[in-house]
Amino acid sequence: MKSDEEILRSVQQWLADVVVGLNLCPFARKPMRAGQIRFAISDAQSDQVLMEHLQAEIQRLDEHQPAELETTLLIVPAHLQRFEDFNQFLDLAEWLIDRQGYSGVYQLATFHPDYQFAGTTAEDTENLTNRAPLPILHLIREASIEQVLEKYPDPDSIPDNNIRRVEQLSREEKRRLFPYLFGDDDSR
């Protein structure tokens, strides 16, 4: 298992090089530059503990204005390593958000080293858009997303643009951007 410092470095590098660098999320650059992204590492090894950590991060967002803390990436290095387990956990996470009255306030974006969209095969390039060095639960303020989407031309094109972008990557670019998928990195 990597140290917290190594985990943070790998996730921050992924965010800078893949999410922002490839412009997969056109809204991530500003909060990253402003230091408004919280990187929280959960030591959870069970769903129950991870739910507690997710709740704590929701409360932290509640306690801060977006100008201070826009979003949180909850990194899960010791639990949900299998994508099937991760995917099942998402039902619990969405239930928590709904049950606590946060539907419409926060939404969850998810990333995993083995992320696979429904209807794709594990090797399909489009899965790279949601592949990260470790399982990540990303809490996003819906009001902030709505503000940005009002100014963004054709937000419905973002997923297709992302797929085209990762499909254009050469094998060398993929190895550099996703070393954990090629065995060049011991993130997992």
Image: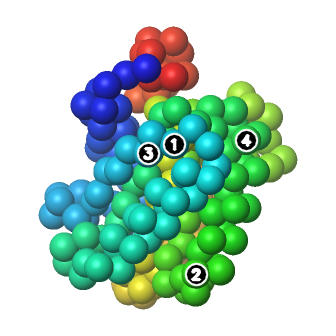
Reading the image, the residue beneath label 4 is 85
- Pick whichever of labels 4 and 3 is earlier in the sequence: 3
Task: Work out whether residue 150 or residue 13 is closer to the camera in this orientation and state it.
Answer: 13
| Residue 42 image-quadrant placement | top left
Upstream in sequence: badge 3 or badge 2: 3
CA gap between label 1 and label 3 equals 5 Å
Task: Establish if 66 lies above or below 83.
Answer: below
Estimate the spatial distance between the alpha carbons at disc 2 and disc 4, rounded to whole Å.
Answer: 23 Å
Could you classify mark 3 by the number of other residues whose Cα lies within 10 Å: few (under 14), some (14-19), or many (20 or more)? some
Instruction: Please tell me whether mark 2 sits on a helix, a strand or a loop.
Output: loop
The residues tagged by marks 1 and 2 sit, at their Cα atoms, a distance apart of 21 Å
Give residue 42's mark: 3
Q: Which of 31/82 is in front? A: 82
Mark 4 surroundings: few (<14), some (14-19) or many (≥20) residues within 10 A: few
Spatial CA distance of label 4 from label 3 is 16 Å
Q: Amino acid at mark 2?
A: Gln
Q: Residues within 10 Å of mark 1 (few under 14, many from 20)?
A: some
Amino acid type of disc 4? Asp
The residue positioned 51% from the left and 12% from the top of the image is 183
The location of residue 61, given as percent across then percent down, is 35, 73
Residue 151 at x, y percent in the picture: 37, 84
* Residue positioned 28% across, 60% down in the render: 37
Which one is in front in this view, the residue at disc 4 or the one at disc 1?
1
Q: Is residue 16 above or below residue 37?
A: above
- Amino acid carrying label 1: it is Ala
Which image quadrant is residue 1 in? top left
Q: Position of residue 184 (x, y in %)?
A: 44, 12
Q: Report the disc number at residue 100.
A: 2
Question: CA gap, disc 3 to disc 2?
Answer: 20 Å
- Which residue carries the number 1 mark? 44
Within-10-Å neighbours for mark 2: few <14, some 14–19, many 20+: few
